[in-house]
Amino acid sequence: MPKFKPARTLLIVLLTMTGAINTAHADQAHSESHEESHARPGRSPQTVDYALILPANLPHILRFAAENSSALELSAEQLAEIRELVKAAPERVLKRLAQAEALEDEIARAVLEKGEKLADLQEKIAQLVALKRGATEAQINTLNRLQTLLTPRQFKMTVQFARQEAQ
């Protein structure tokens, strides 16, 4: 039997009801997230599921800089700093996303199973917003650090590598 993802379903329903997304997109998003949850059971949270800004709009390019160091003609110093950024990113971003996933599930269970009202969930919703905002800010800070580390040409190439993989 498929695992039910109440947080994702609740989010899609709420966004549809508020007009933030239309029904066609909601159905597609629910179907895609439903398929993803079965394809990777027990998976760690993915930015695509939890971030405020989707990777299609703000790509996660750090690993592309590390993986394409030869093509980018990175110096030893640049590569060393990129490796440090790669090590720090999971703590800064993914830890918050894991907390957001747990909190989303908690909020969804509270509404769907316990019938809690919006007024009773305000503090948890504020925590969820703060977690997602923190993850997004950490991602942007990392991208800003990468921009200052690379030449404009290297940065542009790195973005292109990320976008090519996304297609």
Image: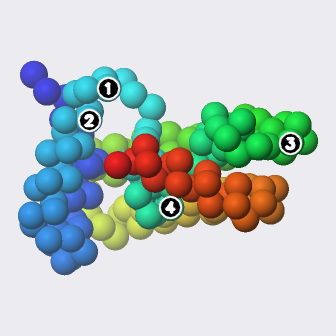
Q: What number is the disc on residue 40?
A: 1
Q: How is the image coloured?
A: rainbow
Residue drawn at 86 percent across, 42 percent down: 75
Which residue is identified by label 3? Answer: 75
Mark closer to the chain start, 2 or 3: 2
Residue nearest the viewer, comparing 99 with 151 = 151
Mark 3 or mark 1, whichever is nearer to me: 3
The amino acid at mark 2 is Glu
In three-dimensional space, the C-alpha distance between marks 4 and 2, rounded to whole angstroms, equals: 21 Å
Marks 2 and 3 in Cβ contact (< 8 Å): no
Quadrant for the N terminus in the image? top left
Q: Does the CB distance between marks 1 and 4 fall below 8 Å? A: no
Residue that label 4 marks: 58
Tell me: 71 left or right of 50. right
Q: Are marks 3 and 1 in contact (CB under 8 Å)?
A: no
* Label 1 or label 4, whichever comes before in sequence order: 1
User: What distance separates the C-alpha of mark 3 from that of mark 1?
Assistant: 37 Å
Q: Are marks 1 and 2 in contact (CB under 8 Å)?
A: yes
Residues packed near mark 2 inside 10 Å, few (<14), some (14 to 19) or many (20 plus): few
- Residue tagged by mark 2? 36
Q: Quadrant of residue 63?
A: top right
Could you say which is closer to the camera, residue 122 or residue 158? 158
* Residue lying farthest to the bottom in this orientation: 19
Q: Amino acid at mark 4?
A: Leu
| Image x and y of residue 100, in percent | 47, 48
Residue appearing at x 25%, y 74% in the figure: 20
Total of numbered circles in the picture? 4
x and y percentages locating residue 85 in the rendered image: 75, 43
